[in-house]
Image: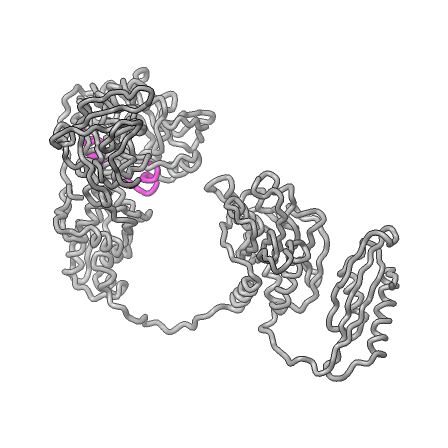
């Protein structure tokens, strides 16, 4: 930033706060050397192998009267090197350095790699990734602190850039933004290239389709000597979280940081036969090996760079492996272009290969920076790689983009923002932004430079005025509209009540993606409907809108099981999606999952393992507390993904409203985290449940008269369900029956084959009078007769 603006006296933390308040969030403000001390440049005088070990005994000049003896195990340590030395007492991220002996040899300090200073592995140059850092700067002297040389003495502001402000992805764009806030005009230098090589454009051809590459420029440099970039360039790259590679690749990355224009460097030998570069869409069946050695099958919608015959790069994403700059490369063709953002984004997603370049192309590029970027890159190679710049820029396409001109008024600006700014104040704000502006009475016209491609309409101008004026300076006022009564709709109130009830049962709420795999979308669904597919899924596990919530709960369970959280009682309330009759539909659902024990293990009680009946009891309690008075029936049915004998469909008044049961073990066998676990679930269609919920629960006093209980034991066929027995009891027991409970179930010895014994407790109550034995006996006789007649039951 100091290259563009006068930053003396600007507090970095205050600047970060100001930027965040203006709409460009600063994720962090870091001073890399904080917490580090006593790190100096050392010059290795001697280096001897310690016999029988991988260690070396060195003597190092650290600017003191006498050199220090330091033991070092790095494979690249050698005499004559300038290195980083941590003196005794130095503080490093890994701890404090002390004097000591290593393998019996005295060591007075430590020779460091960049990682030991806190550098991430991903930014350390490959040559030094497994060893110590070696300086190649003749201006460095033994004993000097290393922080300035390594770029650790400056503040680093991390811009958390949103897609609408991709212009701040470049240093020049960030300089314009900061300059507007501190009232300075950035010093952006013009670039002039004096070629010192022959004109190459006559012997080379560049062809591009304007629709997919509206701008495509090439320059050629020759006589390149591949090596390390100068330290100033490397430190700027690693402070921007980019790994230095060599002086050619580093130059392209530096230009991308500087101007926001992605660059690519091709080994010119790849085009020696055809002397041609053609930008086109890929052909069916073509393949390409990328720089990361990933072999991809190209899609007809991929933009590729070819030599006129075969592909050498995936445009806007990554170059091909065969075209990369190698150690023996001497001639380089530089590319600066603008590619179709939609096709670039889709190619990066399609091949799971998002890069810094693809991110920039898909969000937008400054159309006016193409020539400047390719010229700067050429100059960097001339300066740092002894390159010769050949005459001429080859332009396959060169579409001109006109600057946006927007006219609006000061009165409308103030009305929208709630401000009272004068025209002079508005003009001053646009001057700070370096936008052209003319005025005519209350009207003003702004010419937006191409570096701000996020501005299209007058509302965008109002946002700029509000940002630079300061949102904190806009006075708070009440809206002049009529008041709107807040609150929830009746359906929202019922849904929130259900969630509160489930939480009251001890379950934890989860929130999951509405996207799942095509297979899981219709699993756990009694009657699957047409699937709602995503055109451009993030991955194969997120291709389809879910038709059930259980698939999402399984994802949550897998995440927890992998982290040894094996006792789960969770639920989710959300939407499911389907297509029926050509129309898309959304439905409100509620699902719960139970795994493990019913309660926390404790010495005071015996553990209760969750099973089908426990979950069914929880569901029955929920429906009762929600005020659902209708008859609920559970029928054994086969549903995809559910256990064949531990699953029931739930019906209310004959209408299917959900399911309850155990997840089929075959579904969980492929994941070791699920092995041995019984997972029980239920799912309800709230579109059917909500209309059945009564408003509130009314309390009433305890009955004045006592209830009468009678036990009934019957013998029935094994296929007779409890629901059918209870239905007969309720239909024939009369108006005083208030409760029916199953108190015993027995199958096995001492019973006829194919039979089971069921025992029930019937509770009778007359709230207005005392029940007599005669009334209760008559009711019991009617129940017994009905059971014998309808279910062929034997009364025991």
Is 558 left, or right, of 446 in this rendering? right
By what rule are the colours in the image chosen? Answer: one colour
Which quarter of the rendering shows the N terminus? top left
Front residue of 791 and 711:
711
**Residue that lies at the very extreme toward the front in this rendered image:** 104
Is 504 left, or right, of 788 in this rendering? left
Residue located 79% across and 74% down the image: 734
Q: Is residue 579 visible?
A: no
Q: Main secondary structure of the magenta part?
A: helix
In percent of width and height, residue 435 lies at 18, 50
Q: Is residue 484 depicted above or below 499 in this figure?
A: below
Q: Is residue 790 visible?
A: yes
Is 58 left, or right, of 345 in this rendering? left
Answer with the quarter of the image where residue 286 lies: top left
Front residue of 49 and 789:
49
Front residue of 260 and 272:
260
Residue located 30% across and 21% down the image: 276
Answer with the quarter of the image where residue 682 lies: bottom right
Q: Which residues are magenta?
A: 357-379
In percent of width and height, residue 153 lies at 19, 42
Residue 375 is inside the magenta segment: yes
Q: Is residue 712 depicted above or below 151 in this figure?
A: below
Front residue of 782 and 430:
782
Residue located 21% across and 23% down the image: 221
Residue located 55% across and 52% down the image: 577
Total numbered circles? 0
In percent of width and height, residue 757 lies at 82, 58
Which quarter of the rendering shows the C terminus? bottom right
In percent of width and height, residue 215 lies at 28, 34
Residue 467 is inside the magenta segment: no
């Amino acid at each position: 930033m100091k290259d563009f603006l006068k930053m003396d006296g600007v507090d970095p933390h205050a600047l970060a706060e100001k930027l965040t308040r203006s709409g460009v969030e600063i994720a962090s403000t870091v001073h890399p050397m904080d917490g580090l001390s006593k790190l100096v440049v050392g010059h290795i005088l001697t280096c001897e192998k310690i016999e029988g070990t991988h260690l070396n005994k060195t003597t190092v000049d650290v600017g003191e009267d006498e050199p220090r003896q330091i033991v070092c195990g790095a494979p690249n340590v050698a005499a004559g090197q300038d290195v980083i030395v941590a003196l005794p007492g130095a503080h490093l991220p890994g701890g404090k350095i002390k004097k000591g002996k290593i393998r019996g040899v005295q060591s007075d300090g430590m020779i460091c790699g960049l990682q030991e200073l806190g550098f991430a592995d991903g930014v350390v140059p490959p040559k030094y990734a497994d060893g110590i850092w070696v300086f190649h700067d003749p201006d460095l002297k033994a004993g000097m602190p290393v922080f300035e040389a390594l770029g650790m003495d400056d503040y680093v502001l991390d811009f958390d850039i949103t897609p609408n402000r991709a212009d701040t992805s470049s240093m020049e764009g960030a300089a314009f933004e900061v300059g507007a806030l501190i009232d300075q005009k950035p010093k952006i230098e013009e670039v002039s290239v004096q070629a010192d090589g022959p004109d190459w454009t006559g012997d080379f051809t560049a062809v591009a389709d304007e629709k997919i590459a509206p701008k495509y420029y090439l320059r050629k440099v020759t006589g390149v000597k591949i090596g390390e970039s100068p330290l100033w360039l490397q430190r700027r790259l690693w402070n921007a979280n980019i790994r230095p590679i060599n002086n050619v690749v580093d130059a392209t990355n530096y230009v991308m940081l500087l101007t926001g224009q992605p660059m690519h460097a091709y080994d010119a030998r790849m085009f020696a036969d055809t002397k041609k570069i053609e930008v086109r869409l890929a052909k069916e069946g073509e393949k390409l090996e990328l720089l990361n050695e990933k072999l991809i099958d190209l899609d007809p919608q991929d933009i590729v760079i070819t030599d006129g015959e075969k592909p050498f790069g995936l445009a806007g994403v990554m170059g091909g492996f065969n075209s990369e700059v190698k150690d023996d490369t001497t001639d380089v063709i530089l590319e600066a272009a603008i590619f179709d953002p939609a096709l670039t984004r889709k190619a990066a997603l399609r091949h799971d290969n998002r890069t810094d370049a693809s991110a920039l192309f898909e969000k937008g590029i400054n159309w006016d920076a193409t020539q400047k970027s390719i010229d700067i890159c050429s100059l960097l190679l001339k300066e740092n790689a002894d390159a010769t710049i050949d005459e001429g820029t080859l332009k396959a396409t060169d579409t001109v983009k006109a600057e946006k001109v927007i006219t609006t008024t000061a009165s409308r600006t103030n009305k929208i923002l709630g401000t009272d700014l004068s025209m002079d104040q508005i003009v001053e704000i646009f001057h700070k932004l370096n936008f052209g502006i003319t005025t005519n009475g209350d009207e003003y016209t702004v010419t937006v430079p191409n570096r701000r491609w996020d501005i299209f309409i007058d509302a965008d101008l109002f946002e700029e005025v509000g940002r630079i004026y300061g949102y904190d300076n806009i006075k708070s006022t009440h809206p002049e509209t009529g008041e709107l009564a807040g609150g929830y709709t009746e359906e929202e109130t019922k849904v929130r009540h259900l969630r509160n009830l489930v939480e009251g049962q001890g379950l934890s709420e989860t929130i999951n993606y509405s996207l799942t795999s095509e297979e899981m979308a219709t699993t756990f669904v009694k009657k699957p409907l047409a699937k709602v597919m995503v055109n451009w899924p993030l991955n194969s596990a997120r291709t389809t809108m879910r038709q059930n919530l259980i698939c999402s709960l399984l994802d949550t369970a897998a995440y927890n099981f992998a982290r040894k959280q094996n006792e789960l009682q969770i639920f989710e309330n959300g939407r499911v999606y389907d297509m029926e009759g050509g129309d898309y539909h959304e439905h409100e659902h509620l699902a719960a999952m139970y795994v493990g024990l019913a309660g926390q293990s404790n010495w005071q009680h015996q553990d209760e393992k969750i099973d089908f009946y426990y979950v069914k009891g929880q569901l029955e309690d929920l429906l009762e507390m929600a005020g659902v008075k209708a008859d609920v029936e559970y029928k054994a049915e086969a549903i995809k993904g559910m256990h064949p004998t531990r699953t029931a469909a739930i019906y209310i008044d004959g209408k299917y409203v959900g399911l309850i049961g155990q997840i089929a073990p075959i579904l969980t066998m492929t994941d070791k985290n699920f092995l041995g676990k019984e997972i029980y679930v239920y799912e309800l269609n709230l579109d059917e449940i909500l209309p059945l919920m009564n408003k509130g629960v009314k309390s009433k006093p305890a009955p004045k008269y006592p209830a009468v209980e009678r036990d009934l034991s019957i013998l029935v066929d094994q296929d007779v369900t409890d629901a059918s027995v209870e239905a007969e009891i309720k239909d024939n027991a009369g108006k005083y029956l208030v409760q029916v409970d199953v108190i015993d179930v027995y199958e096995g010895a001492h019973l006829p084959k194919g039979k089971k014994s069921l025992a029930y407790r019937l509770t009778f109550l007359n709230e207005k009078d005392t029940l007599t034995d005669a009334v209760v006996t008559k009711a019991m006789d009617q129940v017994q007769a009905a059971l014998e007649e309808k279910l062929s039951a034997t009364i025991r």
